[in-house]
């Protein structure tokens, strides 16, 4: 199983009926403040050429915006 498949598995577990209530309640719109915050941190890492931090911030960005993962099945069909 590759890392992307692992991510999808985790997100499905979080969004399952017996998963995390907070994750299930989120919408694209409710995640905008988090997306903006994490995006700014990604940009800061790039500007500082801090590639270790960039890797972490990109992971945070993906994690915060996990609602997109549920749409992947539409893209990959």
Image (cartoon, grey):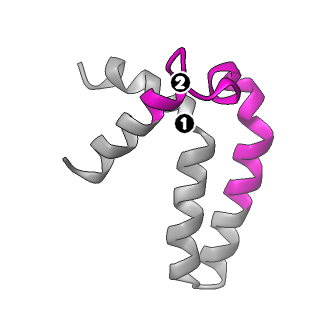
Q: Is residue 72 above or below residue 1?
A: above
Q: What element carries label 1?
A: helix
* Residue linked to disc 2: 15
**In this view, which residue lies farthest toward the left?**
1
Left or right: residue 30 compared with residue 60: right
**In this view, which residue lies farthest toward the front?**
18
- Check if mark 1's residue and mark 2's residue have beta carbons within 8 Å: yes
Quadrant of the rendered structure where residue 40 is? Answer: bottom right
Q: What element carries label 2?
A: helix
Report the quarter where the C terminus lies: top left
Measured as percent of width and height from the top left, residue 75 is found at 33, 24
Q: In this view, does 67 lie above or below 74?
A: below
Residue located 62% across and 29% down the image: 20
Circle number at residue 5: none
**In this view, which residue lies farthest toward the right?**
33
Magenta run includes residue 16 = yes
Q: Which of marks 1 and 2 is nearer the N terminus?
A: 2
* Residue linked to disc 1: 66
Q: Alpha-carbon distance for marks 1 and 2?
A: 9 Å
Check disc 1: other Cα within 10 Å, few if <14, some if 14-19, many if 20+.
many
Measured as percent of width and height from the top left, residue 15 is found at 53, 24
Magenta region: which residues?
11-40
Main SS, magenta region, reads helix
């Amino acid at each position: 199983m590759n890392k992307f498949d692992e991510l999808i598995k985790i997100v499905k577990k979080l969004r399952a009926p017996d998963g995390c209530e907070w994750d299930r309640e989120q919408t694209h719109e409710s995640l905008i403040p988090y997306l903006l915050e994490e995006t700014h941190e990604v940009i800061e890492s790039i500007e500082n050429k801090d590639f270790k931090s960039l890797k972490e911030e990109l992971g945070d960005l993906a994690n915060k915006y996990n609602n997109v993962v549920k749409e992947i099945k539409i893209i990959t069909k």
